[in-house]
Amino acid sequence: MTHSYTLMLLLEALNVMQTVRRTIVIAIFVTSVTVAFFLGGKHSAHQNSSNHQPSPRILFYVDPMHPSYRSDKPGIAPDCGMQLEPVYEDSASSSLPAGALSIPASEQQLIGVRTVVVHSGGGTRTVHSSGRVVPDENHLYKLYAGFDGWVESIRDTPSGVPVKKNQVLATLFSPEVRNAQINYLGFLSGIERLKGTSSGNESQLIRDTATVNAEQLRLLGMDPEQVKHLGESRHPSSNLDLVSPIDGIVLARNISPQAHFDRGAELYRIADLSHIWIIANLHSEEGLPRPGTRVQVSSSDLKHPFFATVSAAQPLVDEVTRTLKLRLEAENPSQILRPDMYVDIEYQSKTQNGISIPADAILESGEGHTVFVETSAAVYERRNVTIGSALGENLLITSGIKDGEKIVVEGNFLLDSESRLHASAPPAATPTSPHPKMNGDNTDPVCGMQISISKFDATFKGHTYHFCSEGCKKKFQADPSKYTSGTASSVMSRSM
């Protein structure tokens, strides 16, 4: 009995020991897993922290409403109560030259910056302009009245109608015409009676007198054929047929039936349009073609373009448009081109030496014309340029950029905005005091803020004071003497 009980106790003790050992093994396993997980997390955190880039260093803090205010500590702006904003080291451009800025590659992609390399040189360009057709003055005829009279009748010859040489245009009436014809016929009859009886000198004198009378008829408006017909018919008349001197186009008719006209009045204007002039309006900077140059002429009224030749005549200046009027000469055998018709002209002109860049690369402002030049990787500098002539969609730059430089042709407007923001940033020197140093009348007497542009003013004892905000102005007006006496330091202390 005793041995059985002892054996039972030994078995129970053995079971307890096995249970304890299992518990210890499980505990060791759990502990190992926990430690391994902790160490792995710590190692991962160490790797993440080693891969993480350090935050940029804060240089100073500025007032968002007044960038000239700086502080080396965060806080509240004394003028408007707004939170001061930090300025980071990578955003400062103190090491860059004036007017330059640095744009990281990531921001360049967002802005869409694109650059091209420019090259200098000259060449030719196509010049487009307009012109107006006018009659060739060497083939333009004006018919004037040689006497006072009336219009007996008019043929169907209004403006724009083509006429033939010696075609009757109108019939004029005047007693002066009949008297001149009678005198001429009388001399002709006298010459015939004296034939064979007068000496050589007398005969020559009679013929000269007849010639003078014939010239009188010419002055009245009779052409040689009409004078000859009068000598053959011997029938004087008070009527005179006005005939066309050429084959041409009636440009103007200034008479009407039964109307009276005075001596010297212009009755008709007729032009031979088989050869015409074209007056082109050009600017001197476009480059004038030399005399003899062939210029292409086109019009919506023409099926095909043709060529005109630059005249040797010097161009005249239009007193209204201040453009040069260049004369071109062209043949017009079909007479499709009529006076006052507008045409387009095109020719090649040599350009001055310079650098041709796209017009979109140039920014216009009150300061002139500027471009952005990439002086080094990701660094852009604003340049003032001088513009020459236009070359199609490009402009010729005569100064400001050099051959081989890179200029911005896309994204320059955003660069301009970024450049102006940098230009409005405060100067590089950082004061130790959270308040700026006062500078005479440009300092707010209440808070000590430096003011570049004043929107709030008040007058006290004949002197005008400037304030950064309406709050400072009200404090001053409540007790002006509190802020207008003492030293600058006392003013600063009161603002605190």
Image: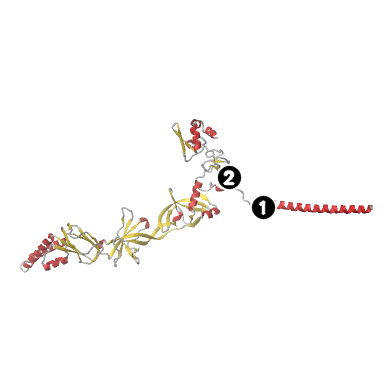
Left or right, residue 370 beside residue 216: right
Residue 194 visible here: no
Outermost residue on the front side: it is: 1
Of residues 356 and 415, the one nearer the viewer is 415
Q: CA distance from mark 1 to mark 2?
A: 25 Å
Whole-percent x, y for residue 445 in the image: 50, 35
Residue shown at 35% from the left, 56% from the top:
284
- For the image, the number of numbered tags is 2
Where in the figure is residue 162, as x and y percent of width and height?
A: 25, 65
Of residues 20 and 204, the one drawn nearer to the viewer in this rendering: 20
Q: Position of residue 487 (x, y in %)?
A: 51, 32
- Circle nearer the N terminus (1, 2): 1
Q: Are marks 1 and 2 in contact (CB under 8 Å)?
A: no
- Position of 398 with respect to 235 (left or right) is right
- The colouring scheme, among rainbow, by chain, secondary structure or one colour, is secondary structure
Q: Is residue 365 above or below residue 152?
A: above
Q: Is residue 291 left or right of residue 360?
A: left
Crowding around mark 1 (Cα neighbors within 10 Å: few <14, some 14 to 19, many 20+) is few
> Which disc number belongs to residue 58?
2
Quarter of the picture holding the C terminus: top right
Name the quadrant containing residue 127: bottom left
Residue 439 vs residue 316: left or right? right
- With respect to residue 282, does 494 lie above or below? above
Residue 159, compared with residue 377, is above or below; it is: below
Which residue is tagged 1? 47
- Camera-side residue of 358 and 220: 220
SS of the residue under disc 2: strand
Which residue ends up furthest to the left in the rendered image? 197
